Image: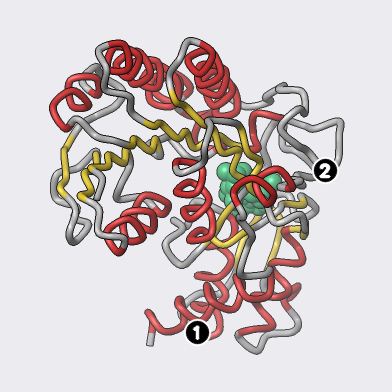
Amino acid sequence: MSRILITGITGQDGSYLAEQLLAEGHEVHGTALRSDEAVPGATLHSIDLSTPGIAELIRAVEPHEVYNLAAISSVFGSWQQPAVTAAINGVAVAEMLAALRELADSGHPVRFVQASSAEIFGIPAEVPQNERTAIRPTSPYGASKAYAHSLVNVYRTAGVWASACILYNHESPRRPEQFVTRKITASAARIALGLQDRLELGNLAARRDWGWAPDYADALRRAARAETPDDYVIATGVAHSVEEFVAAAFSRVGIDDWRSVVSVSDEFLRSGDAPQQLGDSSHAREVLGWRPTVDFEGIVAAMVDADLEALR
Ligand code: GDP
């Protein structure tokens, strides 16, 4: 049994990861911004990562593994709060890695896994992307994640056991509605039940490599248990457009003529939006034995069905 610290434990990824680690019998601690949230079976520490404090918590908990999942997670939101995004997604990671370096130097090595992001590649010149694709972010979110990604490599070279999983978009019924997939499935469910009239979206042509969030939590666990620390692209290797997601979600609720209820608004367009993200996860598949277990159709169906169920 290990003692494990997850930052951002109440988020989509943190909650799935905590459930998986608790099922393995580990002692799980987690940080959350608010003190009124809970993850059954885990010990919560209420801390704001935009201010110093995570190093002290790491020294107090003395974990064997740290998973850094706390973040301003929305690319769109990062344009509204670039400085807070830099503090939480970037500076806090520097504080964590410095603390882990001290612990390693004093004979207490800790394994660290960073939730890195496909957004570090910005508008990728290369399709599909892999661990060697040029890092050229095009949003404050991508820039903050690129800084943290570089730090992981810097501290790995300095002797800290630190890995980075370059996660492509991963979805589930726990995805908040600020992300396009959940916005679509929640709206499709409400429209089908007569609770909403229309849905406004941004760039319908954007293609994303959408995976199933619990599979990505599994990848993080596998990265922490690998022989050596490394970088891994975690992706399905299949891309679909936002429009294809819309069509699949509306078809699931019995609306084939989705164009009659969906429109495009400039409000949801963004600067630097990658036309296509597609990841090559061969390295993770070979070294970690990881593979996605739910395909695009399965993800859409699970999310739409959960939204319909919650409304009925
Ligand atoms: P993220 O970009 O990784 O944070 O994930 P999102 O789910 O927010 O966005 C995925 C893609 O959907 C991006 O290319 C967006 O430009 C596109 N998109 C199109 N319409 C919308 C919308 O109404 N909301 C959001 N969040 N994204 C949209």
Residue topped by disc 2: 128
Contact between marks 2 and 1 (CB within 8 A): the answer is no
Q: Is mark 2 within 8 Å of ligand 1?
A: no
Residue 172 vs residue 271, the one in the foreground: 172
Labels 2, 1: front one: 2
Taking the spot 73% from the left edge, 73% from the top edge, the residue there is 247
The three-letter amino acid code for the residue at tag 1 is Gly
Taking the spot 23% from the left edge, 48% from the top edge, the residue there is 28
Q: Is residue 266 visible?
A: no
Residue topped by disc 1: 194
Taking the spot 24% from the left edge, 29% from the top edge, the residue there is 48
Any mark on residue 299, and which?
none
Q: How is the image coloured?
A: secondary structure
Taking the spot 65% from the left edge, 57% from the top edge, the residue there is 210
Q: Is residue 232 left or right of residue 161?
A: right
- Residue 254, image x and y in percent? 65, 89
Q: Is residue 37 above or below residue 147?
A: below
Q: Is residue 126 above or below residue 59?
A: below
Question: Where, by quadrant of the figure, is residue 241 drawn?
Answer: bottom right
Q: Is residue 132 above or below residue 267?
A: above
Please report whichever mark, 2 or 1, sits nearer to the chain's N-terminal start.
Answer: 2
Q: CA distance from mark 2 to mark 1?
A: 40 Å
